[in-house]
């Protein structure tokens, strides 16, 4: 049975800095899990390392807080073992677009059904504010005191060309809209990448709530067609007006829908009563 947001709330309270965008994402996530009817006993939230990746501790369902950049290998392994389970991955821009980038590229083209939510605060918050893969050009931090000279990763463009079949962006300052985007991602049958503008109020004094309120607009307000890949790319490449909403969505067969070992049903339900593992386990005795 689906849970209410109250039932998804833990007794422990998050220890994020007051005002951090992570709070809004947690609230939006719980609301969307409830609205999409995801059952807690059948839902796994997997994260890497970073401020955002502490999130699985604060939502009542299964959780796995893994290693830096390694949420996707764990999430894909879980999905392969039981593809009836809903998989949500929580990552940050450093975790997902830095050390975890190689995993992301291959997970997208594989099109295994899962929703990957990236808290994109354009800085390394947990390690006290260094320049990250999505920091703007010119961004000054303790690791780039004279300004960042590296072109930032463009998550939406990456998702569109990388093979993700659902590519969207939300803003932590608009929980209602974010919940709608999350709920659509959960219903999508394939790999969903959702990047979220998440102000880090402690270390990023450039990409603030006010900055995004001024710069963002909703794709739904401009009659954008998510089936139009070229139009999605034009929106993704616009660095002046920042779109939020669903950029791109396509129906494509999933990995688990095509893999010969999985089409017969989840591996956890396969009959292994006549399989003898003794020999394989001998090495571990
Ligand atoms: Fe949030 Fe930044 Fe504080 Fe981390 S350091 S909890 S991202 S405000």
Image: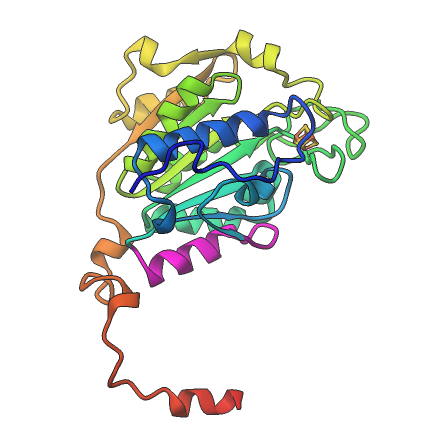
Q: Which of 13/243 is in front?
A: 13
Magenta segment: 65-83
Q: How many marks?
A: 0
Name the residue: 32% across, 59% down: 82
Residue 136 highlighted magenta (yes or no): no
Name the residue: 41% across, 60% down: 77
Name the residue: 28% across, 85% down: 275
Q: Which of 65/229 is in front?
A: 65
Determine which quarter of the picture holds residue 55: top right
Determine which quarter of the picture holds residue 209: top right
Residue 244 shows in the view: no
Residue 48 shows in the view: yes
Q: Which of 207/9 is in front?
A: 9
Name the residue: 71% across, 18% down: 205
Where 274 falls versus 211 (above or below)?
below
197 left or right of 281 in image: right
Which quadrant, please, contains the N terminus?
A: top left
Where 108 falls versus 160 (above or below)?
below
Q: Which of 123/9 is in front?
A: 9
| Quadrant of the displayed image that contains ligand 1 | top right
Position in image of residue 109 (x %, y %): 35, 48
Position in image of residue 84 (x %, y %): 28, 53
Position in image of residue 90 (x %, y %): 50, 41
């Amino acid at each position: 049975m689906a849970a209410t947001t109250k039932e998804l709330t833990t007794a422990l309270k998050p220890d994020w800095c007051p005002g951090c965008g992570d709070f809004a994402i947690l609230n939006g996530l719980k609301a969307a899990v409830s609205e999409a009817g995801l059952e807690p006993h059948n839902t796994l939230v997997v994260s890497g390392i970073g401020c955002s990746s502490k999130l699985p501790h604060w939502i009542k369902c299964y959780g796995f807080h893994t290693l830096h950049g390694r949420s996707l290998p764990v999430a894909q392994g879980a999905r392969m073992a039981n593809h009836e389970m809903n998989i949500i991955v929580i990552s940050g821009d450093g975790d997902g677009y830095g050390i975890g980038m190689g995993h992301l590229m291959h997970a997208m083209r594989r099109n295994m059904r899962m929703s990957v939510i990236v808290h994109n605060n354009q800085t390394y918050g947990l390690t006290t504010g260094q320049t990250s893969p999505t920091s703007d050009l010119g961004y000054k931090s303790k690791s780039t005191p004279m300004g960042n000279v590296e072109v930032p990763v463009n998550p939406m463009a990456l998702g569109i060309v990388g093979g993700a079949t659902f590519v969207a962006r939300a803003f932590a300052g608009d929980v209602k809209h974010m919940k709608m985007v999350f709920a659509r991602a959960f219903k999508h049958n394939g790999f969903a990448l959702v990047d979220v503008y998440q102000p880090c109020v402690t270390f990023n004094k450039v990409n603030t709530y006010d900055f995004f309120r001024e710069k963002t607009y909703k794709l739904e307000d401009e009659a954008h067609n998510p089936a139009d890949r070229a139009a999605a790319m034009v929106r993704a490449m616009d660095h002046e007006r920042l779109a939020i909403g669903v950029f791109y969505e396509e129906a494509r067969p999933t990995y688990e829908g095509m893999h010969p070992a999985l089409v017969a049903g989840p591996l956890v339900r396969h009959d292994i009563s006549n399989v003898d593992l003794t020999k394989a386990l001998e090495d571990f005795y």
